């Protein structure tokens, strides 16, 4: 049985910045429909991501998942590289 601790969010985004030796900034784009007007609304958000294995590079499309807090703003880690740059 899955509990709340084992269910972690997963997102897909593009690596846009190398912020250190083990940290990357990933831009995740979301698309939705406005509730009232029905217009397609696009949004994006940047996440600081931990990459302990060093598999990601700038421009890669990566899958990230939630994890325990690693630092003040870094609570995501890279699961896999979906598409190389």
Image (spheres, helix red, strand yellow):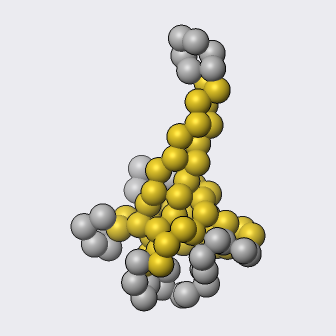
Residue at image point 32% right, 73% down: 70
Residue at image point 51% right, 64% down: 26
Residue at image point 35% right, 68% down: 74
| Residue lying furthest top | 36
| Residue lying furthest left | 72
Q: Is residue 67 visible?
A: no
Q: Quadrant of the C terminus?
A: bottom right
Q: Quadrant of residue 37?
A: top right
Q: Is residue 38 above or below residue 54?
A: above
What percent of the width, then of the height, locates residue 4? 42, 50
Residue at image point 55% right, 87% down: 54
Q: Nearer the viewer, residue 66 or 74?
A: 74
Q: Is residue 47 above or below residue 34?
A: below
Q: Is residue 40 visible?
A: yes
Q: How many numbered circles does the render carry?
A: 0
Q: Nearer the viewer, residue 67 or 33?
A: 33
What percent of the width, then of the height, locates residue 28? 55, 53
What percent of the width, then of the height, locates residue 13? 60, 59
């Amino acid at each position: 049985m899955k509990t709340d601790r084992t269910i972690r969010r997963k997102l897909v985004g593009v690596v846009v910045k190398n912020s250190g030796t083990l940290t990357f900034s990933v831009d995740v784009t979301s698309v939705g429909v406005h509730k009232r007007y029905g217009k397609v609304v696009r949004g994006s958000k940047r996440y600081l991501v931990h990459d302990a294995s060093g598999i990601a590079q700038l421009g890669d499309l990566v899958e990230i998942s939630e994890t325990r807090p690693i630092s003040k703003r870094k609570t995501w880690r890279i699961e896999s590289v979906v598409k190389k740059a």
